[in-house]
Amino acid sequence: MKSDNGPLFVHSARPNLPVERVAAILQAEWGISGELADVGGDRDQNLVVTTPAGTSWLVKIGQPGEVHGVLDMQLAALRHAAHQDPGLGIPPVIPKCDGEYLHALPADGGGAGWLRVFGYVAGKPIGTRPRPAALLRGVGGTMARLDRALAGFFHPYAGHDLLWDVRQIPALRPCALDIDDARQRDRILQIFDEFTEHVLPRLGGLRSQVIHGDATAENVLVADDRSAIAGIIDFGDVMHGPLVQELAVAMADTTSGLDTPWQGASHVAAGFDERLPLEDEELALLWDLARARLALTVSVLASRTVHRAEGAGSMESDMTAYQDQLKAFDAVGHNRAFRDLRRTLRLPEPMAVTGSGTDTETDRLVARREERLMPGLALFYPEAPLHAVRGEGMWLFDADGTPHLDCYNNVPHVGHCHPHVGNAVARQTRTLNTNTRYLYDSVLEYADRLAERFPGELGSVMFVNSGSEANDLAWRMARAWSGQGGALVTAGAYHGVTEAIAALSPYEAGNGAPHPHVAWISPPGGAAQASSRGDGGYAVDIDRAIDRLAASGYGVAATMIDPTLASDGILDAPAGWLNTVFARVRGAGGLCIADEVQAGFGRLGTAWGFEAHGAVPDIVTLGKPAANGYPLGAVVTTPAIMRVFAERTDFFSTFGGNPVACNAGLAVLDVLDREGLWAAAAEVGGYLRDRLAALGTRHETIGEVRGRGLFLGVELVTDRDSRQPAPKATARVALAMRRAGVLVGVEGPHANVLKIRPPIVCKHTHADLLVDALDRALESG
């Protein structure tokens, strides 16, 4: 049997040269002499020659029909891989005395067989003995290393036809007709037909390169103690093909005899993925490819049993093992196989087919949260929790594949799963992740790029993991600098979850009183109240708070202000308000901390929120959006403040400023600069605010639209004259918008402000979708 392009050697007999003739050729052409022993083989005659000194060599003699160019390609690939990765344990190709690698053996019927010699690799075949998960991962990792070594290899004969290539299944379908058992025959024919119709057309779109193609239990060698992979042999099936086919062969052919073969195969895949990450389409086809490989093997072995010439192949004794392996893979099925892969590789949760219905699954997840996580851990939209499984740009997709326009989350600052950020994280994770006790460039480059964006003396940087930690560190710096222990915060502020910072977060206190060392100042009201109250009233309120702290012996260490005034209701502070706060605090010996965890990185239409107020703080804290979802926080202050803090304490954060976090942060800055997002937030935000304000002419429940850039609040009231808060209506509108596929939040001390805080990749079209959804929700209200 042959394909369109050449022989496949299904039934042909392997050579059987007399040992004496082989010995004479070795002596004459290679200068090698010793005892020879036949070690079998599928298509080649394989002999081991052992010299009197104890050195062993492997001699391979090919069939007369084999093409010289194909064999030359195999040897060239082997030499290339060994050169690229010397530690792989690849057998060296031994040249003849004249420097050639192949020796022609004229055949009686014409043509020639080809003899070649390889160095012997220490180790034993992995076989079917116990194979713990670590060893199976080693198999996958070794094949990935080999494929990385082969990635740049080219040879004109790499595209040859090969018997064991699953892409030959249409040509080899007649082999399945030779299976005796009718039930098994029909099953394998069905597998072949399904593969030909549904899988084969998709292979052309996958990554392809030259691969080894034969990672079987006989060709993967392990060390004597079976603790690690020692080498990979037999390059007789090298070909150009889909990269994932390499892995599928290893998964099928090194896990036979295990109690749970597919679980073992998943460990092989995990080892491969750790060194050469798999793409989504490759993962989706792995089970199909591995099963097809097994079905092809069973068919070829059955056909050889019926038609083979004497001496053809040496795998007939493995027929039962391959049949059992195929049965085990079939029993798992495609869906469960993919779930097992997902768990083992820690893949993101897959989307269901649209319209499949996920109410039961959602209920199950909610019940699991209540059982395993902290009681009362809040969910957005508790009446209709969102089971999110994927994000892209402005969109979140639920388990049914339904898209939701995300106008709520400011953590994915440059859009959900921005590829530049994702690639930066993945590449650095695969290279190095450590801490700032070591030297590396990225932490300094990121600190430099942050510092150049701040005014005045703000240029000393310290990294942590979150906004809460940044605020905690800033508070410690302020106390060290001032020698005092009191704080001024707005009455509805939220600054974080550490014990020290929770005390500075009245939002967490509910109706409770402030801690003794904390004074609450009234936040500036909306635009209407601000014009009637004026700067003087605010100054009196601030002075009164400072006096109270002084009288109680705490004094003022700092004020911590969120420039968005988010938890206070997303308020529009009057001109000069923040400068008034800062001036009064500095006059009392304290420092001014701008909590930019929500306002920073261009969200308010300026680089930093404090710039929108025309003020300059002493310390700036950063968090949420800094790394687009990767944990990263920072404190930026003056060299003098940083120096005093360093003299009085020894601060260190194990993960703060690690290389992965810094590269994620650098990637976010890249995107902000390249895509012009610093300015876009002001322009799109202004457009969105105007459109939201226009809704107020249609809906009396809109009391006021507030905020800057892409951090806006829509206050809902029962009566526009009294401005009586309408929290129930606000919750109802937010839920209606969520069910319509647009996500917004609820904010403010009375829970009556719709919080609109999208990724700053928001465009005019997204703004229009948001406003239209809000219009409909208010209309139905």
Image: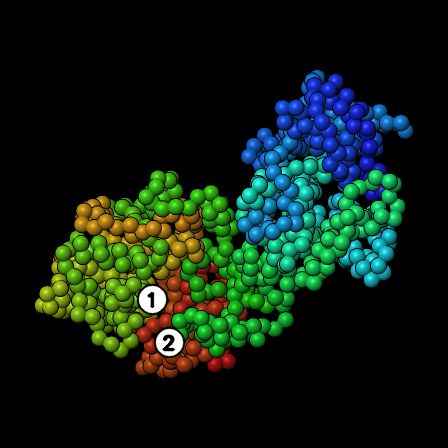
Local secondary structure at mark 1? loop
Tell me if 283 is positioned left or right of 198 in this view. left
Residue 145 visible in the snapshot = no
Residue 646 place in picture, x, y as percent: 21, 47
N-term mark: 1 or 2: 1
Tell me if 254 is positioned left or right of 180 in this view. left
Residue 112 visible in the snapshot = yes
Tags 1 and 2 touching, CB below 8 Å:
no
Residue type, numbered disc 1? Ala
Residue 431 place in picture, x, y as percent: 47, 43
- Dot 1 corresponds to which residue? 566
- Dot 2 corresponds to which residue? 752
Residue 237 place in picture, x, y as percent: 72, 39
Q: How many marks?
A: 2
For the residue carrying disc 2, how many other residues have a C-alpha within 10 Å: few (<14), some (14-19), or many (20+)? many
Along the line of sight, the residue nearer the viewer: 41 or 354: 41
Quarter of the rendering occupied by the N terminus? top right
Above or below, comparing residue 15 to residue 364 in the picture: above
Instruction: Tell me the residue at 64%/66% (across/down).
Output: 353
Label 1 to label 2: alpha-carbon separation: 12 Å
Residue type, numbered disc 2? Asn
Instruction: Tell me the residue at 41%/77% (across/down).
Output: 730
Along the line of sight, the residue nearer the viewer: 449 or 245: 245
Above or below, comparing residue 43 to residue 111 in the picture: below
